[in-house]
Image: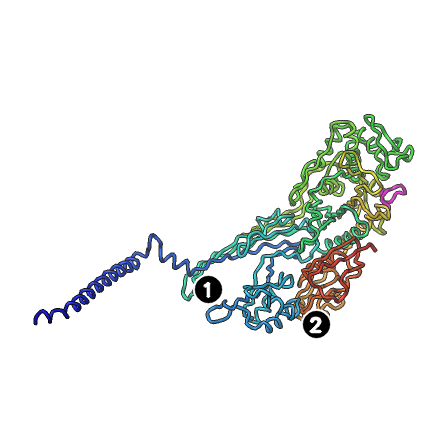
Amino acid sequence: MKNKSSKPRQPRHNRKNFGIFIFLVVAVVFLIFSGRFIYIAVAGHVDSANLQKERTNQYQTDSVLRAKRGTIYDRNGNVVAESSNTYTIYAILDKKQMIGDEPNHVVDKAKTARVLSRYLALSQSAIKAYLNPKKKSTFQVEFGPSGQRLTLAMKQQIDKQKLPGIKFIENPARLYPNGTFASHVVGLTKSSGSGSDAQLTGILGIEKLFNKTLKGTNGHQQLQTDRYGYTLPNSQKIVKKPVDGGSVYTTIDSGLQTYLETLMDSVNSTYQPTGLNAVLMDAKTGAILAASQRPTFDSNTGIGLDNMWRDSLVEDAYEPGSVMKIVTLASAIDSGNYHPNEYYQSGSVQVSGTTIRDWQTSGWGSIPLLQAFPRSSNVGMVKLEQTMGAATWQKYLKRFKFAQKTGIQLPNEATGSYSFSKPLDQAITSFGQGINVNMVQMLQAISAIANKGTMIEPRIIQKVIDQSGKTTTYGKKEVGKPISASTAKQVIEAMRDVVTAEYGTGQAYKMPGVDLAVKTGTAQIAGPNGGYLTGSNNYLFSVAGMAPASNPRYILYVTMKQPQKMTKAAESIMAEIFKPMMQRALALSTSNSDSSTDQRTVPNLLNQSLTDATSKLGSTFTPVTIGTGSTVVQQLPEAKSTALPKSRVLLLTNGAMTMPDITGWAKSDVLKLAQITGKDFKLVGEGFATQQSLAKNQVLDNQTVTIKFEPK
């Protein structure tokens, strides 16, 4: 009986033992994990990793606080270049994108298209097409050129609509309110880096030379955030504020500069020179009031930059030609080697077996040296050089600081040079061959004539205010007295004769009521294989003048290289710049007014109805509508910039982007059209617009529009 009762208890005993075993295993594992967790909690480390640091990093947001690049001003405090941000709009389409319980993607595409069409230069149907890409898995989309380069004001208007999934990319930008405006002098920036690390760096002109002053220093901030990116309450916040860039004040006068650009555009388009330069300087202080060159570029778009990277005001060294005779005459007079009533045989002269000829190869017979300068006689200048002797002539070249940099505050100034080892070299420098100068060196030399023998260093900077607020002022700087006051007076008299004498070469520059002193120049251009180019237009033509001659206030220097359509004499062509520019400067001086009053401030027209915007412009400006909408979404020139009366203000409206009638437009206006629309334009020819491949009121899609230009 006992054996029968013991059999059922054996399985129960085994199960009990197994249960005890499992319990012990679980207990041991629990103790191990508990011990590990207690260790981690106390020590705060796992495998040498600091858990507190890892947790902080996981919920810590680091961001760059971008410094604002400093502003460049003209001499009157008008903005020439300033920091700005542009924005690119995009739409998130991925429906999985959420912020907490709120959608972070486009929910209502029809509503989004309807609202955005009020702000972008796109129709509702075009926006819907972007929001419904063929590839259904598309995460996000942009809106092409019409969704780029948006202003802060436009971004803020769109943000107010609270459209889910509509986001913006902020891009650092540089705004040049005047467009083509001493572009090579003011300079240019480029963006380096990406996202929050993007920074503008100067690569040309003042932007480059003063980059360290202008760029500023970025700051940063650290915030504690939750999983959705929201800042945690009572969390630690570390902020290092950015230091904005300093300011640079130039000597440029906006009114005079804008007027010069207009004159340059006209001459450039009509006569098509390969190069054109003009500089207006205050003779008393050396301040450059206006400087322009062709080819040039629009600082906002960069269009035209590929044609000319160099600032030809300082970077190009060239043979100045007969303008150099100002220095030759001054040196001969000052050294006692000028005898005005002494006669010489004009036409030609032999130097070391080489024949040097006057521009009028037959000459004018036997004439007094008094007439050599106003007639621009090469032979007469050689006579003066030979009378002085090489040593004396070279001494004066050094006194006038040729082959030395002026030190003007612009990058890459050319040093210049001259050959002086042989008698022929010495002779031809007297009429501007065999010597290379930059325009600023020539202005500096001429300043001695205007200032009773005292030479003034040209300057483009008025003052610089660095990041700490320290101001450095650049004032008038005398850099020598190469000649006496009496010598300077005699040279001015000779320059007067260039304009007033019946045999003077500068009669084209006569201005009623203006006491003017001038020297013209026609320099041969060195050929690529030695020697000089031939042909009636293969010259560097120039004129340097000062007014009033009795007490010079302004020096104006204009050069023109190889006009392709030389329909009149070079002097008459350059007079189209010289005369009105000098008259404008003198009028400013006489009225003692700020030249910038010739400019008008462009009003803010953004988000206004087209009717109201047009009314605001009134008769002051010429409005041009681009688009089928009724609300202005972009304008050019931008609000608060200055422009000449009657100049065009482009108004981009919402809705489909359309082509205006651009008949008679200058290239500068067409370039503004390209800028505001973001479309491709092919510009053919020179002068003013006569034909357009896309008719007025036709929709501007992604086609390239060809514009043909012809001189008037």
Give the quadrant of the C terminus.
Answer: bottom right
For label 2, the crowd category at 10 Å Cα-Cα, with few meaning under 14, some 14 to 19 and many 20 or more, is some
Q: Where is residue 572 in the image (x, y as percent from the top left)?
A: 85, 48
Residue 563 appears left or right of 398: right
The reply to whether residue 509 is visible in this rendering is no
Say which element carries label 1: loop
- The three-letter amino acid code for the residue at tag 2 is Asp
Residue denoted by label 1: 229
Give the quadrant of the N terminus.
Answer: bottom left
Residue denoted by label 2: 612
How many circles with numbers are drawn on the protein? 2
Query: Which residue is pictured at 43% across the width and 64% down the height?
Result: 227
- In the image, 373 versus 640, the foreground residue is 640
In the orientation shown, which residue stands out farthest toward the right?
Answer: 365
Q: In which quarter of the image is residue 45?
A: bottom left
Query: Which residue is pictured at 70% across the width and 72% down the height?
Result: 612
Q: Where is residue 145 in the image (x, y as percent from the top left)?
A: 64, 61
Q: Where is residue 509 in the image (x, y as percent from the top left)?
A: 84, 48
Provide the major secondary structure of the magenta segment.
Answer: loop
- In the image, 167 versus 552, the foreground residue is 167
The reply to whether residue 485 is visible in this rendering is yes
Q: What residue range appears in magenta?
A: 498-507
Q: Quadrant of residue 340?
A: top right
In the orientation shown, which residue stands out farthest toward the top?
Answer: 352
CB contact under 8 Å: marks 2 and 1: no
Nearest-to-viewer mark from 2 and 1:
1
- Earlier along the polypeptide chain: callout 2 or callout 1? 1
For label 1, the crowd category at 10 Å Cα-Cα, with few meaning under 14, some 14 to 19 and many 20 or more, is some
Say which element carries label 2: helix
Q: Verify whether residue 710 appears in magenta.
A: no
CA gap, disc 2 and disc 1: 42 Å
Is residue 691 shown above or below 105?
A: above
